Image: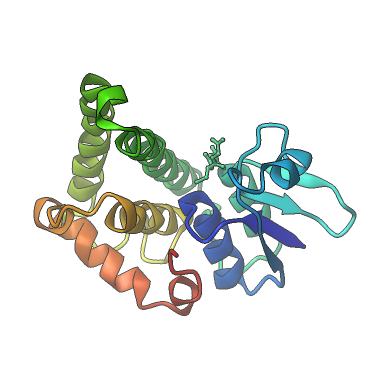
Amino acid sequence: MQIIGTTSSPYTRKVRVCALEKGIAHEFVVASPMTGSAAVQAANPLGKVPVLVRADGSRLIDSPLIAAYVDGLSPVPRLIPADGAQHEATQQIEAIADGILDAAILVRVETLRPAVQRNEEWVSWQLGKVHRGLAHLDALLHGRELFVGNELTLGDIAVACCVGYLEFRLADGEWGVRYPKLAAHLDELEARESFAATTFA
Ligand SMILES: N[C@@H](CCC(=O)N[C@@H](CS)C(=O)NCC(=O)O)C(=O)O
């Protein structure tokens, strides 16, 4: 099994962490959707990473689908709980973390443009999603260390990949101050081998 992606992609990191946490053997194939776009487009018509390639050559795109597939490959540890309410809560948290990332990446693309081309109103609109999402997630951690139940879930992994990406690309020294629960949660997860093996670069 291969996971195609980049070391700077938070969605790619999420699925790599899932595979590592579950001990699923895979090859990480680095291909950029920007510089290596032909290779990525050949694997995914949308030209995005991550892409999972199975031994039979069939492919899966979109990180939530890939994460769910990887989780289904072995019974333990379960990253998406079997219990209905916990299952839904886990995927809801993943969706919020991914949505924050979608907005944060739009902000980053905008900030890479020359100042005259930058649309500050659009940046503020996207940052609104980022901050409302982070405030929501931070509040969910009130009185608890993990998002769902007492075991690590895909929700925790998705949020740590999201907050880690914000630190990596949009660091302003304020994330940890404004969202202390998320900062502590990130510290906790970054100590795991799966996160140490997939640092952003
Ligand atoms: N919803 C997708 C988002 C993937 C995504 O946007 N990946 C970025 C890299 S972090 C990408 O490939 N961007 C290239 C593009 O949008 O053309 C997922 O969860 O896999």
- Rendered location of residue 107, percent (x, y): 32, 35
Is residue 67 left or right of 193 when viewed as pictured? right
- For the residue pair 89 and 31, the one nearer the viewer reads as 31
Task: Work out whether residue 20 or residue 140 is closer to the camera in this orientation and state it.
Answer: 20
Q: Position of residue 188 (x, y in %)?
A: 30, 72
Front residue of 122 and 98:
122
> Quadrant location of ligand 1?
top right
* Colour mapping used in the image: rainbow
Outermost residue on the left side: it is: 177
The residue under the point 78% across, 41% down is 42
Instruction: Tell me which residue sits at (58%, 46%) in the image.
Output: 63
In which quadrant of the rendered image does the C terminus lie? bottom left
Q: Is residue 131 above or below residue 173?
A: above
Residue at 43% across, 59% down: 157
**Which image quadrant is residue 181 in?**
bottom left
Residue 74: x and y in percent read 69, 65
Q: Residue furthest right?
A: 56
Q: x%, y% of residue 197?
A: 50, 75
Q: Quadrant of the N terminus?
A: bottom right
Residue 125 makes an appearance in the image: no
Q: Nearer the viewer, residue 1 or 113?
A: 113
Residue 129 seen anywhere in this rendered image of the structure: yes
User: Number of marks in the image?
Assistant: 0
